[in-house]
Amino acid sequence: MTKEELLSKLKTIITPYVQNTKGLESLNENTDFIKDLEINSANLVDVVLDVEDEFDIQIDNEAMEKMLTVKASLLVIEEKLEAK
């Protein structure tokens, strides 16, 4: 799966939780879920659960804590997919 495909899937997953739609329009690897998209911390847990379902992976607490930006999330997803 290419980075573009991963980013597209991630964008689809986070869209329902985004409060700042302008931030979503300019989504890139440096986008911060809390600061730029205004996703609250409870919804970040939902994002992680949705990511687990979409990619059929398990994300432990340590990895979950890193998933605050698009880039960090993509790295965690890629790492978990490679480990499968």
Image (tube, rainbow, N blue to C red):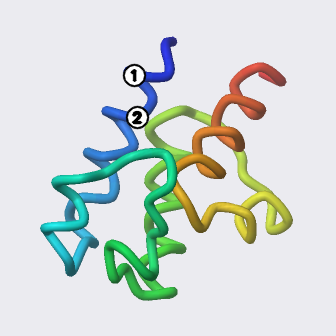
Identified at 44% across, 54% down, the residue is 50
Q: Residues within 10 Å of mark 1 (few under 14, many from 20)?
A: few
Are the residues at dot 2 and dot 1 in contact (C-beta closer than 8 Å)?
yes
Q: Residues within 10 Å of mark 2 (few under 14, many from 20)?
A: some
Residue corresponding to mark 1: 4
Q: Is residue 41 above or below residue 57?
A: below
Q: Quadrant of residue 80?
A: top right
Q: Position of residue 62 (x, y in %)?
A: 85, 65
Q: Is residue 10 above or below residue 64?
A: above
- SS for dot 2: helix
Q: Position of residue 38 (x, y in %)?
A: 33, 82
* Left or right of 35 on screen, residue 65: right
Identified at 33% across, 58% down, the residue is 14
Identified at 50% across, 22% down, the residue is 3
Looking at this view, is 34 or 16 the one in front?
Answer: 34
- SS for dot 1: helix
* Left or right of 71 on screen, residue 37: left
Looking at this view, is 2 or 81 the one in front?
Answer: 2
Q: Position of residue 30 (x, y in %)?
A: 50, 54
Mark 2: which amino acid?
Answer: Leu
Looking at this view, is 77 or 24 the one in front?
Answer: 24
Looking at this view, is 12 or 4 the one in front?
Answer: 4
Q: Position of residue 26 (x, y in %)?
A: 24, 53
Mark 1: which amino acid?
Answer: Glu
Tell me the distance, in whole angstroms, between the alpha carbons under discs 2 and 1. 5 Å
Q: Quadrant of the C terminus?
A: top right
Identified at 53% across, 73% down, the residue is 45
Q: Is residue 52 above or below residue 69?
A: above
Residue corresponding to mark 2: 7
Q: Quadrant of residue 79?
A: top right
